[in-house]
Amino acid sequence: MLGTIGCILAIALLIITVFKGLHPLIAGLLATAVVIVCCQVPVWDTFLNGYSAGMTGFIKNYVIMFFMGAAFGEFMSLSGFARSIAYKMIDIFGAKRGILIIVATTAILTYSGVSVFVVIFAIYPIALYVLQAGDIPRRLLPGMVNLGAGVFTMTMLPGSPALTNVVPANYLGTTIYAAPTLGIILAIVAAVLGLVYLEWQAKVWKKNGEHFTPGSKDVMMPMSGESREDVPNFFVAFVPVAIIFVGNLVGTRMGLNATFAVCISLLLGILYTAILSWKNISNAAKLEGINKSAANALISITNSAAIVGFAGAVKMVPAFQNFLDFATGIGGSPLLAAVISMDIICAITASSSGGIQIWCELLGKHFLSMGVNAQQLHRLVTVAAGTLDSLPHAGPNLTFMTVCDLKFKEGYFPIFVITCIIPMICQFLGLALAGLGIC
């Protein structure tokens, strides 16, 4: 009992301290210490084989991808390609449709296979000019990107290449296109609710006197007629984005590791951008851009990995099984129990992909043996995995805040609405629709 209470207290401590601005590494270590004391497990073994192993494992798997993503975003900005894309999108849809532009562009990238962790680097330089044109408060950007990257494209749309949608197919005997009708309905509901909320929130903040302001490290050109004279051609500027889209699609179809496919696509995008804009960027700016990319990548991945380490420690303690026993012991519909168990695991691990991996390994066969529809089970637990995985201690949130130069008290609330409340609504809507036989 003490261990279970300790885990709950540790998660609460982690969320509060990260939200208040404590560095994720310190917050993660403190939360792990609470788990160790309350669960009475070996101190060094838990820190070394739980926390440190989880943290370094994440860095090992994704550090190259983070650097490539940061470098891509930096060169898109230096080359003027980001500004060119932003201008064209504004010309087509209008400055008033800035939120839709950002959400749609993000959704296209992530549905093509770009990781949630990386997409912020690619979209940020483009989004800045879109936000400036529409005078949209910058602190709404993490919510917009999350809607396009971490909600309907990640867990609801059939065929999503996101790891959260791929993992259950390997355990439940399904495919990434499981329960297509159910998934499409939920995706439409989530997208509409998200866009309505974001537009409303922007209006509220504007009425309160908030306007667009660039971050302290953002270097932007003025959006005037004169500033367009040296902007690269839109079609030339859009090619790197297309390279990422096609590269991820082809790479994953060829059976390449998903992370490797992303890195290759980003590298090709970087090379294209650098070659075509080489003469227009000074050597000093190139060097500064590369160094800035490396620094930003290390900051972002370290912040995220520090929280992943905590999840690694929690998984080692016996109390973790208590949460699983509670979830599987819920009476009524097996699908409801499956969804609740996924909610709990992802809230603890702060990771949809990590949480669904654990769930499939420990509980997948259990729920299949209860005779549930595997297609519905796949889609609903995938949606559930993307519900409470986005509490303040989630890795992507830390990356988004770092890149956008925001504090949690400035930019987290829209994230919470977009990635927790709306998916929770869709989760229970999905249960109701599944009860009607929709699949």
Image (cartoon, grey):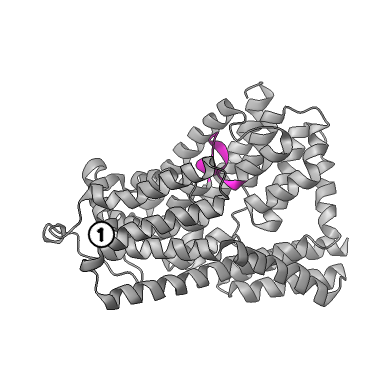
| Amino acid found under the numbered disc labelled 1 | Leu
Identified at 21% across, 67% down, the residue is: 279
SS class of the residue under badge 1? helix
Report x, y in % for residue 110. Answer: 47, 47
Seen in the picture, residue 136 relative to 242 is either above or below; the reply is: below
Report x, y in % for residue 146. Answer: 48, 51
Would you name the residue on which mark 1 appears?
276
Identified at 53% across, 54% down, the residue is: 260
Report x, y in % for residue 339. Answer: 71, 40
Q: In the rendered image, which quarter is residue 168 located in?
A: top right
Label 1 Cα neighbours within 10 Å, binned few <14 / some 14-19 / many ≥20: few
Q: Is residue 414 magenta?
A: no
The C terminus lies in quadrant:
top right
Left of 228 or right of it: where is 55? right
The N terminus lies in quadrant:
bottom right
Q: In the rendered image, which quarter is residue 176 located in?
A: top right
Seen in the picture, residue 165 relative to 274 is either above or below; the reply is: above
Residue nearest the observer in this picture, 201 or 6: 6
Q: Does the magenta stretch include residue 161?
A: yes
Residue nearest the observer in this picture, 155 or 35: 155
Identified at 76% across, 66% down, the residue is: 313
Give the extent of the magenta segment.
151-163
